[in-house]
């Protein structure tokens, strides 16, 4: 197996751990102050941290590092807006479905959408055709989500 694939998988695993931690925090905070405020404030705090990093890079690398086409700014604005809805949705759903079932369902949604993107070759990487093995993987994941959902 290629080193880049192993490295990518390890970074993905660490990212998953970070998502699980963030989701747990968002769920708890959402229960205290409400889901929508959690989504807004979480992204605001992340934005403040990002500004600090940006200022550091500005001092370290100079202003040239921030020359970004306006079309990219529009795409990033959409991405940031989706982040608000993602945190809000996580906070809402995990309080009701539980952390494991909620995150598993979120992952299933990500997998299904990513499967479509890969199959159509629109993700900016080489097309990965749909196959029986990949479809079975999605079905097994869906069954796992079903088993994790609280019954009652």
Image: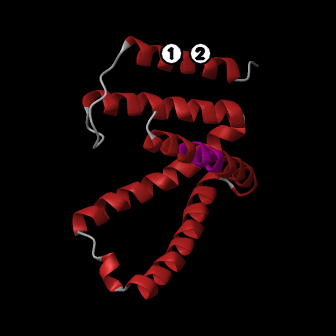
Say which quarter of the image contains residue 145.
Answer: top right
Q: Residue at x 46, y 77 (%)?
A: 54
Establish if 35 lies above or below 116: below
Expressed as whole percent of the image width and height from the top left, the position of residue 120 reads: 26, 29
Badge 1: how crowded within 10 Å, few (<14), some, or many (20+)?
A: some
Expressed as whole percent of the image width and height from the top left, the position of residue 58 reads: 42, 84
Expressed as whole percent of the image width and height from the top left, the position of residue 42 reads: 60, 62
Quarter the C terminus occupies: top right
Which SS class for mark 1?
helix
Tell me the number on the disc at residue 119: none
Q: Are marks 2 and 1 in contact (CB under 8 Å)?
A: yes
Tell me the number on the disc at residue 139: 1
- 11 relative position to 20: left or right: left
Say which quarter of the image contains residue 140.
Answer: top right
Q: Is residue 14 magenta?
A: yes
Establish if 17 lies above or below 152: below
Establish if 141 lies above or below 21: above
Say which quarter of the image contains residue 146.
Answer: top right
The range drawn in magenta is: 12-19
Q: Residue at x 50, y 15 (%)?
A: 139
């Amino acid at each position: 197996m290629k080193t880049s694939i192993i490295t990518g998988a390890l970074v993905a695993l660490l990212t998953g751990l970070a998502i699980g931690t963030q989701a747990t925090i968002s769920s708890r905070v959402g229960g205290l102050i409400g889901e929508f405020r959690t989504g807004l404030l979480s992204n605001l705090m992340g934005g403040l941290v990002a500004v600090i990093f940006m200022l550091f890079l500005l001092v370290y690398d100079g202003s040239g590092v921030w020359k970004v086409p306006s079309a990219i700014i529009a795409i990033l604005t959409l991405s940031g807006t989706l982040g608000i809805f993602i945190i809000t949705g996580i906070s809402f759903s995990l309080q009701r479905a539980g952390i494991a079932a909620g995150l598993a369902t979120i992952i299933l949604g990500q997998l299904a959408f990513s499967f479509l993107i890969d199959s159509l070759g629109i993700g900016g990487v080489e097309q990965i055709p749909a196959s029986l093995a990949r479809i079975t993987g999605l079905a097994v994941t869906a069954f796992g989500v079903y088993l994790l959902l609280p019954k009652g």
